[in-house]
Amino acid sequence: MLEDLIVYAAVACAALYAGWRLLPAGARFSLAEHTATMALSLGFAKADPEAVALRQRRAAARSKSACGGCSGCAGKQGAQPVRFINKGNL
């Protein structure tokens, strides 16, 4: 009986983790912010000024970028063109 409960808990944790990782980044950030807000309102966590500032910076970055909250690919070039080689031209 105890072994069954452990296995069920492991499968449930794995399913939650897989679902979390497969969510789009925007949905994960939104869900995390809502969960943090709910935890603060219920008194489970204390308000951290650094975390509030981080959430504000992420929200501002998300509004500036089309794909998410980072600027890691802003300076990179676009995709390189694909070149085909014909055997007749060799």
Image (spheres, grey):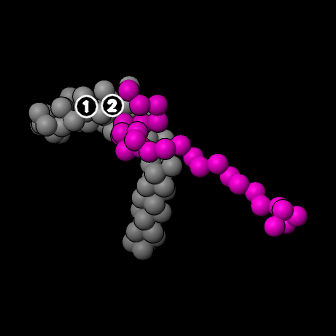
Residue shown at 85% from the left, 66% from the top? 87
Name the outermost residue toward the bottom.
Answer: 3
Classed neighbour count for the residue bearing mark 1: other residues with Cα under 10 Å, few (<14), some (14–19), many (≥20)? few
Q: CA distance from mark 2 to mark 1?
A: 6 Å
- Does the magenta segment cover residue 85? yes
Residue located beneath label 1 in the image: 57
Q: In this orientation, does residue 12 appear?
A: no
Q: Which mark is residue 61?
A: 2
For label 2, the SS is helix
Classed neighbour count for the residue bearing mark 2: other residues with Cα under 10 Å, few (<14), some (14–19), many (≥20)? some
Residue shown at 59% from the left, 49% from the top? 80
Residue shown at 57% from the left, 46% from the top? 79
Q: In this orientation, does residue 62 appear?
A: yes
The amino acid type, in three-letter code, at marker 1 is Arg
> 73 or 51: which is nearer to us?
73
Q: Quadrant of the N terminus?
A: bottom left
Question: Would you say the residues marked 2 and 1 are in contact, meaning their CB atoms lie under 8 Å apart?
Answer: yes
The location of residue 19, given as percent across then percent down, is: 49, 50
> 48 or 87: which is nearer to us?
87
Q: Quadrant of residue 25?
A: top left
The location of residue 40, given as percent across then percent down, is: 19, 32
The region drawn magenta spans 64-90
- Does the magenta segment cover residue 14? no
For label 1, the SS is helix
